[in-house]
Image: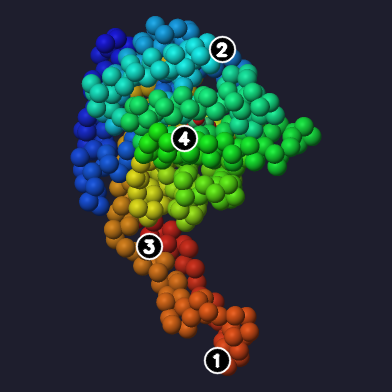
């Protein structure tokens, strides 16, 4: 036990009318919605990096948080950090958490020592999982912060960096497997380029495809039953990242024969950076059969970069969960808060209450989405719009029509389509009745 969160009580459901600050107004984990407990729908996870490893720096200034585990350069402080992290998970009552290797162990500068410290600290964390019942949603490798990764990991022009990346992912997948992780994530922050003038784009894509195949082959060799997830993001830190958005990732997976093996971890802020809405990314991934998990953190809409803020906009989360529910909900995936408090939010209470607010925002979004789905009103309107496709003629046209046979049909039946309303505003009004 540490005293970092001293005087902060475990957060429980207090209901919408309570004025208790450390309480959930909407997240009532045992409440059953559409036949499933809220906790099992949402599958919340805390991100180790933003809450515990990030020191509050921005491009204009360094550390603002002075935590008891700073500087994070020893196994002693790594253990304190782990103790505090599990205390926070307990206070919040979250079922899951996520880590990068670089968040949980000190960076020693060489692979053998990094491997030793990763194995040691993940053993320690696995013990804490067993004591508390808190589980690992996913593990991942940070292959973007250290200077060795500056020109990419699997897409690096130097084969020695590719080798270092392969060994690093093996170590992280082994640790994730040991800890019963539900998924393993690859986000390629430096898998892209700064300028095409020095980049062989086709070769880099081939290397990334081979690398991901190696990961999948290894997963099967060790019997890891979790899902391998790729996380799309269009840019930042690289000027252009190969995993641009859901559709680009699917094209990549298909080219390298991985579309049945790998799914996507979609992040709200990344969708915005790609010029999409979050619900577009979820619906696209679901349509292509690669929906996996979400990082539920938003960007500041004026800043134009990835500000990783906690969600606090209910209509936005409702639109996202509507698509999650339509996709059949999460299987191995969940809702990870890849979010950080602002650098002026220094207090331990800020960390807790940021998550409380985010969990409530998601719970409200889920409830609104579930109620609308259950009412069937939006689905009925959608179905009515496509009703023509249920007729035998339309079905036959799709199944066996040719341009010649269809032209003959248009002439014979004098087909002359009349436009109908898309009813957008009426559907928006319907939607607004629920959020
Ligand atoms: C970066 C980002 C990562 C991934 C995991 O924008 O989202 O934190 O979620 O590497
Ligand atoms: Co993320």
Residue under label 2, please give it: 109
Q: What crowding class fits label 1: few (fewer than 14 Cα within 10 Å), some (14-19), or many (20 or more)?
A: few
Residue under label 3, please give it: 378
Q: Nearer the viewer, mark 4 or mark 3?
A: 4
The Cα atoms of the two marked residues, 2 and 1, are separated by 74 Å
Q: Nearer the viewer, residue 106 or 36?
A: 106
Q: Residue at x 55, y 80 (%)?
A: 401
Quarter of the picture containing the N terminus is: top left
The Cα atoms of the two marked residues, 3 and 2, are separated by 55 Å
Q: Residue at x 36, y 11 (%)?
A: 79
Q: Residue at x 29, y 54 (%)?
A: 371
Q: Mark 4 and mark 1 in contact (Cβ < 8 Å)? A: no
Q: What crowding class fits label 3: few (fewer than 14 Cα within 10 Å), some (14-19), or many (20 or more)?
A: some
The Cα atoms of the two marked residues, 4 and 3, are separated by 43 Å
Residue under label 1, please give it: 413
Q: Mark 3 and mark 4 in contact (Cβ < 8 Å)? A: no
Q: Residue at x 48, y 39 (%)?
A: 216
Q: Nearer the viewer, mark 1 or mark 3?
A: 1
Q: Mark 3 and mark 1 in contact (Cβ < 8 Å)? A: no
Residue under label 4, please give it: 218
* Sequence-earlier tag: 2 or 1: 2
Residue 394 higher or lower than 252, as above or below: below
| Circle 3: element type | helix
* Sequence-earlier tag: 4 or 2: 2
Q: Nearer the viewer, mark 1 or mark 4?
A: 4
* Sequence-earlier tag: 3 or 2: 2
């Amino acid at each position: 036990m540490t005293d970092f969160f001293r005087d902060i009580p475990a957060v429980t459901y207090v209901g919408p009318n309570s004025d208790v600050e450390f309480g959930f107004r909407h997240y009532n984990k045992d409440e059953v919605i559409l036949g499933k407990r809220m906790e099992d729908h949402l599958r919340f996870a805390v991100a180790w990096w933003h809450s515990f490893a990030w020191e509050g720096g921005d491009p204009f200034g360094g550390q603002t948080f002075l935590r008891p585990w700073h500087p994070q350069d020893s196994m002693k402080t790594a253990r304190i950090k782990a103790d505090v992290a599990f205390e926070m998970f307990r206070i919040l009552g979250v079922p899951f958490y996520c880590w990068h290797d670089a968040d949980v162990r000190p960076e020693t500068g060489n692979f053998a020592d990094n491997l030793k410290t990763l194995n040691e600290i993940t053993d320690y964390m696995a013990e804490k999982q067993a004591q508390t019942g808190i589980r690992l949603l996913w593990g991942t490798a940070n292959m973007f912060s250290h200077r060795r990764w500056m020109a990419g990991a699997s897409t690096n022009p130097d084969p020695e960096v590719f080798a270092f990346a392969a060994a690093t992912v093996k170590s992280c997948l082994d640790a994730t497997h040991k800890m019963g992780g539900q998924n393993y994530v690859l986000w390629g922050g430096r898998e892209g380029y700064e300028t095409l003038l020095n980049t062989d784009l086709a070769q880099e894509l081939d290397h990334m495809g081979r690398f991901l195949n190696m990961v999948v082959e290894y997963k099967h060799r060790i019997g890891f039953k979790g899902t391998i997830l790729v996380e799309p993001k269009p840019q930042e830190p690289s000027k252009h990242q190969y995993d641009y958005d859901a559709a680009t990732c699917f094209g990549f997976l298909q080219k390298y024969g991985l579309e049945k093996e790998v799914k996507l971890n979609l992040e709200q802020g990344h969708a915005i950076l790609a010029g999409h809405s979050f619900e577009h990314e979820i619906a696209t991934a679901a349509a292509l059969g690669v929906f996996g998990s979400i990082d539920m953190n938003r960007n500041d809409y004026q800043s134009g970069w990835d500000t990783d803020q906690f969600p606090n906009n209910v209509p936005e989360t409702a639109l996202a969960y509507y698509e999650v529910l339509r996709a059949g909900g999460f299987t191995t995936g969940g809702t990870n808060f890849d979010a950080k408090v602002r650098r002026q939010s220094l207090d331990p209470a800020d960390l807790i209450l940021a998550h409380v607010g985010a969990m409530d925002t998601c719970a409200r979004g889920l409830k609104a989405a579930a109620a609308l789905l259950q009412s069937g009103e939006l689905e009925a309107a959608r179905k009515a719009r496509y009703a023509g496709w249920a007729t035998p003629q339309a079905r036959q046209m799709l199944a066996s029509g040719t341009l010649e046979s269809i032209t003959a049909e248009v002439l014979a039946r004098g087909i002359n389509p009349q436009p109908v309303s898309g009813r957008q505003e009426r559907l928006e009004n319907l939607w607004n009745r629920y959020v």
